[in-house]
Amino acid sequence: MLVGVDLGPSSSFDPTLDELALLAESAGDVAVARLIARRKAPDAALFVGSGKADEIKALVEQHRATGVIFDQALSPAQQRNLERHLGVQVADRTALILEIFAQRAQSHEGKLQVELARLQYVATRLVRRWSHLERQQGGIGTRGGPGEAQIELDRRMIGDRIKTVKQRLEKVKRQRGTQRRAREKSGTFRISLVGYTNAGKSTLFNSLVKARTYAADQLFATLDTTTRQLYLPQLGGTVSLSDTVGFIRDLPHKLVEAFRATLQEAAEADLLLHVVDASSPQLAEQLDEVDRVLAEIDAERIPQILVYNKLDRLDEATRPRVLVDAVERAPGLRVPRIFLSAMEGTGLEALREAIAAAASGNADDYVTPAGEAAAEADEPPSPEADEAPATRSMQA
C-alpha cells in the first residue's frame, strides 16, 4: 500500500503517487492501494496521526497488503510505531530506493557504494527498534564484555564495516582518478550524460556509441558508470562519453555521498548532456531536481546541452515545430535544446553536430557557462536577446 502526505507548498509532493508506484514496481512489489493525507506538520509518533493510521490499517486489512510504503522519509521511531500499529512492515522512500540500488548494482564499486549507504541508513534505526537489542549480556567468556548491550555490539559492528567500506571506496576513487588523469593527458573531450531516472540516458548512450548497455523502461536501470569513445565525423576525431546513474526527487543524501566517486565523472566533464523526458508531466520539477544534485556535486558551472528525449511519445499536436533551439534557464543563461527520440533515431545528427561544435571550441555558440551568464546579466540586454528564447520555445 502506498501512502503520500502533503505537508504544504514548502515540501515536494506527488499527488498521483505514480513515481512511488514505479519505484515499488522496480523493487518487485505490486501496489494494491493508494492513500493521500494532508497535514501542516508530521505527527511525531505516527507521522500521519492516529486517525489516518487507523484508516491505513483498515485499507491494509481490506486489500490484504503485506506492507506499507511512505513517499516521505520516516524517522526510526515513526517507522517502529507504525509497524506496531499497522501490523505489517513499513518502509519509506529512502529504504525503497536503497532496495532498488542493492538489486541493480553490478560492479564491485557499485556494490560497495550501495552497501555503504544501506549501512548508514540501518545504523540510525538500531535504537529501540528490536526488543532483543534491549537485553544485556556479560560475564567471563561472553562476547562483548560485562554489561555491554546487544545494541552497542551491533552499532560497533556496523561502524567497523562502514569504516572498511569507506577505505575500499577510497581506493576505487584513486583508481578512477588515475584513469581520468590519463584521459586528461590524452586531451580527450569528456562528456557525461546526466538526467532524471528513466529519462532515456542509456538508450541515448547506446544509440550514439552502438554499445549494449542495459536499458529498460524502469527507474534506476543503470547504476554503474560506463564510458565509451564516440566518433564524430564533424570533428574528425573522438570524444569520451559516459553514462551515469540517474537522479530522482528526494534522492537520499547518503546515496549522493556514497556515489560521489561515480558522480565525479559528471563533475569533471567538459560538457553535460542533460537528458529530459519530454513526455513527462513533471518535466519542470525533474529539471530542477537534476540542477539541485549537480549543484551538490559542484557540477552546476559545467556547460550543458538540454536533450529533450522521447519525442516519439508526444502527440503530433504537442510536438515542437523546431527540433533545435535555445532556452533560458536563468537570467542571461541561454542553453541549447535539442528534441530527439533515442529510440527512433530522430534528432541524433543534430546532437552530434552540437557536441562537435562544443568539442572544437565553438561552445559559445551553443552554451553559456553559468559564471559568464552571471556577468552578462549585469549588462543591459540587447533587443535581439529579449525576444530570443520565447519565440522558439516548445509549442504545445
Image (cartoon, grey):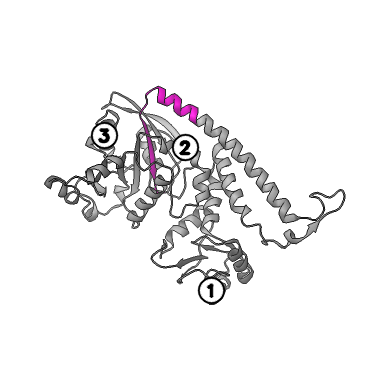
Q: Residues within 10 Å of mark 1 (few under 14, many from 20)?
A: some
Image location (x, y in percent) of residue 113: 55, 42
Q: Which residue shows up at 58% across the image and 40% down it? A: 112
Q: How far apart, in angstroms, are the residues tagged by discs 1 and 3?
A: 54 Å
Q: Is residue 184 left or right of residue 27?
A: left
Label 2 element class: loop
Return the residue nearer the eye: 225 or 50.
50
Say which of 240 and 372 sits in front.
Answer: 372
Label located before the other in sequence (1 or 2): 1
Residues 204 and 108: in front is 108
Q: What residue sits right under mark 2 in the picture? A: 225
| Image vertical order of residue 312 relative to residue 47, above or below | above
| Quadrant hosting residue 379 | top left
The one nearer the camera, 235 or 164, is 164
Q: Which residue is mark 3?
A: 363
Comes first in the chain, label 3 or label 2: 2
Please state which amino acid type lies under the numbered disc 3: Ala
Q: What residue is rendered at 63% in x and 41% in y? A: 163
Q: Amino acid at mark 1?
A: Gly
Circles 1, 3 touching at the beta carbon (< 8 Å)? no
Q: Which residue is mark 1?
A: 49
Q: Which of the marked residues, 1 or 3, is nearer the chain's N terminus? A: 1
